[in-house]
Image (cartoon, rainbow, N blue to C red):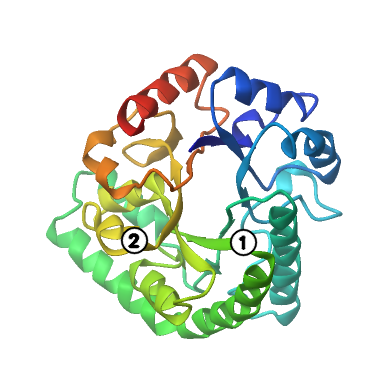
Amino acid sequence: MLGISTCWWYRKVDRADTIVDDVHQLGLDGVELEYRMTHSMYLEMKPRLKTSLPVYSIHNFFPIPEGFGPAQGSGNLFLLSSMDAEERSKAVEYTIQTIEHAHELEAHAVVLHLGTVDMRSPVEGFAKLHATGRVGGEAATVFLNEQRRVRKATRQKHLDAVLMGLEELNGVAEKEGVLLGIENRYHFHEIPDFEEIGLILNRFEGGHIGYWHDIGHARVQENLGILRRNQLLDAYSKHMVGVHIHDVMGLKDHLAPGQGEIDWQEIKPYFSSSVPKILELNANRVSRKELVEGIEVIRSHFS
């Protein structure tokens, strides 16, 4: 079950239905529809999606809500973690629409971003430590511990908001027969972190909420010393409902497999054949040739 996110075609094609032809030409099995696709683009593809190309997953929010352009499409367009009731309401409303599209297309799962903790982003601090080779050293340990203290002190109201939203969404997902995949995130201040994934999975055990693993996000956090190597996979692979596949070089992700540092053989045992594997590649960083080569890399390890 090897598919690809439509994000690779962002700004590359004039007609969305040509993506279907291209996926077939690449020899892939299915597709993930992502959040920068407009309703009109979706309508172009829809007839063929229902007849000739399986939709493995849909990345929330899909399609782009009315009033927003493709460049504004984002999994963070509305945050379940927001303290603004209207924003949370929109996050739930548009996620339900995504779930309904997933049901109609018989997609396996909807991929969710959950939001952020209200703290000053420590991105620059982590990047500086990485650039100067100090990850794992005393300064990095002090910095990480302080960021964890700040995050934990401010997270609860945001986590409570997320859990409240997921309660409603889980009920809708159960009714529609669609799984919700909570995705591990790139940035330290985003929800969920390692602990919060476990809290959410325990809260909704037996429901329709599972774990969506992003290989690149996990490796970046490992490279920053936030996570231990394969810590997320060791803890949550049994709850996995899907995986985003891309390579990483340092802190740069969404590269084609083979462009970076990921040891595919090392992580292969964590992924069962039934889990949808979605190539999620940056259109500006990955050429057609690199995409084709990346597909071969993954096929050689996961076939």
Q: Nearer the viewer, residue 97 or 134?
A: 97
Taking depth in this image into account, of 254 and 208 the one nearest to the observer is 208
| Dot 2 crowding, Cα within 10 Å, few <14, some 14–19, many 20+ | few
- Against 47, residue 148 (above or below) is below
Give the CA separation, mark 2 to mark 1: 18 Å
- Which residue corresponds to the image point at 69% horizontal and 66% vertical from the top-left? 176
Q: Which residue is mark 1?
A: 178
Q: Residue at x 59, y 31 (%)?
A: 8
Q: Quadrant of residue 29?
A: top right
Residue 12 can be seen in this image: no
Figure label count: 2
- Residue 147 sits in which quadrant? bottom left
Place of residue 214 in the rendered image (x, y in percent of width and height, measured from the top left): 42, 49
- Give amino acid for label 2: Lys
Q: Residue at x 54, y 17 (%)?
A: 288
Q: Nearer the viewer, residue 71 or 294?
A: 294
Number of the label disc, if any, that sits on residue 238: 2
Q: Is residue 110 left or right of residue 228?
A: right
The image shows residue 114 at horizontal and vertical percentages of 55, 67
